[in-house]
Image (spheres, helix red, strand yellow):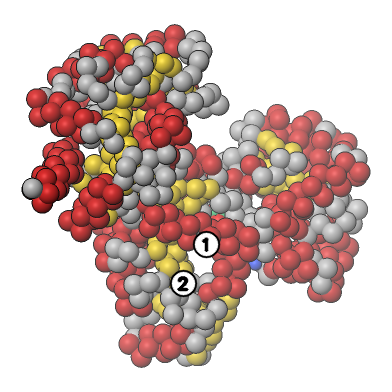
């Protein structure tokens, strides 16, 4: 039976060795609890490092056996690998870069090489455990190269990837010397998931500008495979945090802490010691608050739980010193015999202790400089049974996109922070309860189980979609079937894309004129009274008229803005307002100035920037910039940017070739339909076709077309054979009757 394999750097357990005996303890954290319910089912498996360096062969064997009973399998890492792969490249290169602290990032080729080799090690272990039909779900920044490594070995496997930390803007990401390899690694997945839409947007932009792949509604084509990029905000195990908060043990602990803190209002913060968490800023804000609002002296305490983390790394040691110093200074300045404004704890605590603090806290301070999601703020909300309490949340945490009822702040704006502290402490209880209950409703619904299930559903959907988009090569057997259908039909309709379908692209669009062979082919095809031939193009109508107007064919010009039936004149299907053109033209002019050889073409309902004549490389580079620029400007407008063959076109969205094609389908209800196209715009034509139509994509990127061919030459040969077959048949008939 196909199984699900979860891969993360660490397994969801901690191993401890006491007096030569191994003990396994479950580890806390969002991922472990969230996926805990699924990896234990059936034959599912979780693969990762068990958290301990093991050298002895027998001990390794023991761990493998013990873990197998719990549906886990270890990847053993050496001390050097931990140092260079985990502490080094993952935490000193990727972590700072992805959290917008690139000034802290180190770029060291040796660390990168170990990162590559450890990703390969994970891949090798997975290959020992995986079967071809398994679903593989890779997690987080330590394993960015793994999806492509797996894809190479298992080309048809279902591979998901989820990034738990932010994906930075292109401007920051591009600083990494290994940016291209990293993106290519991630692109081996079928579904790339992020916490927020912004992360997803940044990723798509980096892929477009660094690797050169465009995207449409989150879909990226990599060769003949399409993958999807989407956002899935991660939730918590709401039930678990909510029920533990009313457990006897937690209430007992709360009583003890309350006794010690007396009537103090409590502000709470819980984070790992990390520069991304904004701990010094929080202390500065609290100090300013005490200075500005002395009436709160002896009435409020900041309980700050800081969990030790990565303390072997220099930057973390410095941060620890800075925090120690700040806490010391503030407490030194404001403490009284009976009151310490800050209660600071540098250690980790059992969940029951955290829960007791969540219950007690009047205000929770979750104010990171940058955070992928942040689960602490969600746990605080789930623990608040009386719905009294205020959450102050940084805009820079992914969670702020969902929890808009929190007091949102920019952690760099210390005066705003101070006012938020004051507002939280003075907020009427009824108001607190309204906000809290809204946030609880959201988190109850979008809990961790929901997150897992929508991610897995989406991954299955991608696989189905890939299957429906996998076009098979149009072979001889299919041709024979098509030819029979052609001969039996009394009404036949052809939609033939001009550029890329019938005629190869030329450096200059004006040079791609019809040749004698093409004229003859179209004449032959259209001379049969049962045939109706529609030539489809994004070219201007005057251009098509000049080249093909004499023929007995119908025409679709400018992506479907203009149509012409052979016995009638041109007519437009839309009456669109074109006032967007003035602004967009200014931008295109700018790109013409900066890109020698490029030029603008103005059509009735679109503008096109052509770069066919531009120096190789430069044109592609500028085109990527321009597509990004235009996509940004066209958000919330009804404009569509098409990244075409050596051209970028912007047009009103209502215009599409598929709509225009429907016009003919409605009039003729043909028994035989054949559509040929080659780029994104032609997908609209394929989609508009009835189920019995033969749809052919030129080129082998994925498409909704049923078949594909490689060249225009092959389209022509196919059409010629269809017509010739008819002629042969006719002759045979005549000869037979003689
Ligand atoms: C990464 C991303 C994203 C903390 N101290 C103790 C303790 N914890 C638990 C908390 C919470 C978890 O650790 C921390 O989760 P966060 O989400 O806040 O932060 P990261 O560890 O940086 O996680 C983050 C997350 O991945 C999930 O995708 O949200 O943005 O950085 O569950 O309760 N638990 C115990 N004792 C402690 O002292 N038992």
Closer to the camera, 3 or 379?
Answer: 3
Q: Residue, x 76% and y 35% (percent of image)? A: 420
Question: Where's residue 255, x and y in %?
Answer: 87, 66
Q: Is mark 1 within 8 Å of ligand 1?
A: no
According to the picture, the residue beneath numbered tag 2 turns out to be: 4
Q: Residues within 10 Å of mark 1 (few under 14, many from 20)?
A: some
Give the SS element for disc 2.
strand
**Distance from the alpha carbon under mark 1 to that under mark 2:** 10 Å
Quick check: marks 1 and 2 in contact, CB under 8 Å?
yes
Name the residue furthest front: 738
Question: Where's residue 95, x and y in %?
Answer: 44, 50
Q: Residue, x 91% and y 43% (percent of image)? A: 430
Q: Quadrant of ligand 1?
A: bottom right
The image quadrant that residue 35 belongs to is: bottom right
Closer to the camera, 351 or 372?
Answer: 372
Q: Residues within 10 Å of mark 2 (few under 14, many from 20)?
A: many
Give the SS element for disc 1.
helix
Count of labels in the image: 2
The image quadrant that residue 24 belongs to is: bottom right
In the image, residue 671 above or below residue 664: below
According to the picture, the residue beneath numbered tag 1 turns out to be: 456
Question: Where's residue 177, x and y in %?
Answer: 28, 43
Question: Where's residue 265, x and y in %?
Answer: 85, 49
């Amino acid at each position: 039976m196909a199984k699900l394999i979860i891969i993360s750097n660490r397994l969801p357990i901690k191993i401890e060795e006491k007096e030569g005996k191994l003990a396994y303890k479950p580890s806390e954290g969002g991922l472990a609890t969230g996926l805990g319910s699924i990896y234990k089912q059936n034959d599912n498996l979780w693969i990762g490092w068990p958290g301990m360096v093991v050298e002895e062969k027998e001990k390794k064997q023991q761990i493998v056996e013990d873990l197998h009973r719990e549906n886990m399998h270890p990847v053993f890492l050496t001390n050097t690998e931990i140092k260079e792969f985990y502490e080094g490249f993952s935490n000193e290169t990727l972590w700072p870069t992805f959290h917008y602290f690139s000034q802290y990032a180190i770029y060291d080729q040796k660390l990168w090489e170990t990162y590559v080799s450890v990703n390969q090690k994970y891949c090798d272990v997975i290959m020992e455990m995986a079967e071809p039909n398994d679903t593989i779900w890779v997690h987080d920044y330590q394993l960015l190269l793994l999806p492509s490594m797996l894809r190479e070995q298992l080309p048809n496997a279902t591979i998901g990837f989820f990034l738990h930390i932010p994906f930075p803007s292109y401007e920051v990401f591009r600083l990494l010397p290994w940016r291209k390899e990293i993106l290519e690694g991630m692109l081996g997945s079928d579904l790339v998931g992020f916490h927020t839409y912004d992360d997803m947007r940044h990723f798509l932009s980096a892929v477009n500008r660094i690797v050169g792949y465009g995207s449409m509604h989150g879909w990226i084509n990599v060769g003949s495979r399409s993958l999807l990029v989407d956002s899935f905000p991660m939730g918590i195990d709401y039930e678990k945090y909510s029920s533990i908060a009313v457990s006897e043990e937690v209430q007992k602990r709360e009583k003890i802490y309350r006794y010690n803190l007396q009537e103090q209002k409590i502000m709470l913060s819980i984070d790992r010691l990390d520069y991304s968490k904004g701990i010094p800023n929080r202390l500065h804000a609290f100090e300013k608050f005490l200075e500005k609002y002395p009436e709160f002296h002896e009435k409020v305490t900041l309980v700050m739980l800081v969990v030790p983390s990565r303390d072997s790394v220099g930057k973390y040691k410095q941060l620890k010193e800075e925090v120690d110093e700040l806490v010391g200074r503030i407490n030194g300045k404001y403490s009284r015999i009976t009151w310490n404004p800050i209660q600071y704890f540098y250690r980790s605590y059992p969940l029951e202790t955290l829960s007791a603090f969540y219950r007690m806290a009047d205000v929770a301070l979750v104010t990171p400089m940058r955070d992928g999601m942040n689960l602490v703020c969600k746990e605080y909300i789930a623990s608040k049974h009386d719905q009294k309490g205020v959450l102050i949340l940084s805009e820079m945490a992914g969670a702020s996109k969902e929890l808009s009822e929190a007091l949102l702040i920019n952690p760099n704006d210390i005066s705003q922070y101070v006012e938020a502290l004051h507002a939280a402490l003075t907020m009427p209880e009824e108001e607190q309860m309204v906000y809290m209950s809204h946030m609880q409703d959201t988190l109850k619904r979008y809990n961790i189980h929901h997150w897992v299930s929508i991610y897995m559903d989406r991954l299955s959907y991608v696989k189905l979609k890939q299957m429906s988009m996998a076009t098979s090569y149009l072979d001889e057997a299919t041709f024979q079937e098509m030819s029979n259908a052609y001969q039996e039909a009394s009404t036949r309709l052809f939609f033939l894309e001009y550029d890329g379908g019938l005629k190869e692209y030329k450096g200059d669009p004006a040079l791609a004129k019809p040749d004698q062979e093409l004229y003859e082919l179209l004449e032959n095809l259209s001379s049969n009274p049962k045939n109706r031939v529609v030539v489809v193009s994004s070219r201007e109508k005057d251009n098509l008229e000049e080249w093909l107007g004499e023929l007995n064919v119908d025409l679709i010009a400018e992506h479907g803005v203009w149509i012409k039936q052979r016995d009638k004149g041109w007519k437009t299907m839309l009456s669109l307002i074109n006032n967007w053109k003035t602004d967009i033209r200014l931008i295109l002019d700018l790109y013409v100035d900066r890109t020698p050889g490029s030029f603008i073409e103005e059509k009735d309902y679109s503008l096109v920037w052509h770069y066919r004549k531009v120096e190789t490389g430069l044109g592609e580079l500028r085109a990527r910039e321009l597509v990004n620029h235009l996509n940004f400007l066209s958000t919330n407008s009804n404009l569509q940017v098409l990244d075409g063959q050596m051209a970028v076109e912007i047009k009103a969205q209502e215009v599409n070739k598929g709509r225009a094609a429907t016009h003919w389908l409605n009039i003729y209800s043909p028994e035989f339909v054949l559509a040929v196209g080659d780029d994104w715009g032609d997908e609209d034509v394929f989609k508009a076709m009835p189920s019995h139509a033969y749809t052919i994509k030129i080129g082998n990127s994925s498409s909704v077309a049923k078949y594909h061919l490689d060249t225009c030459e092959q389209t022509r040969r196919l059409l010629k054979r269809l017509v010739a077959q008819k002629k042969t048949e006719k002759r045979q008939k005549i000869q037979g009757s003689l």
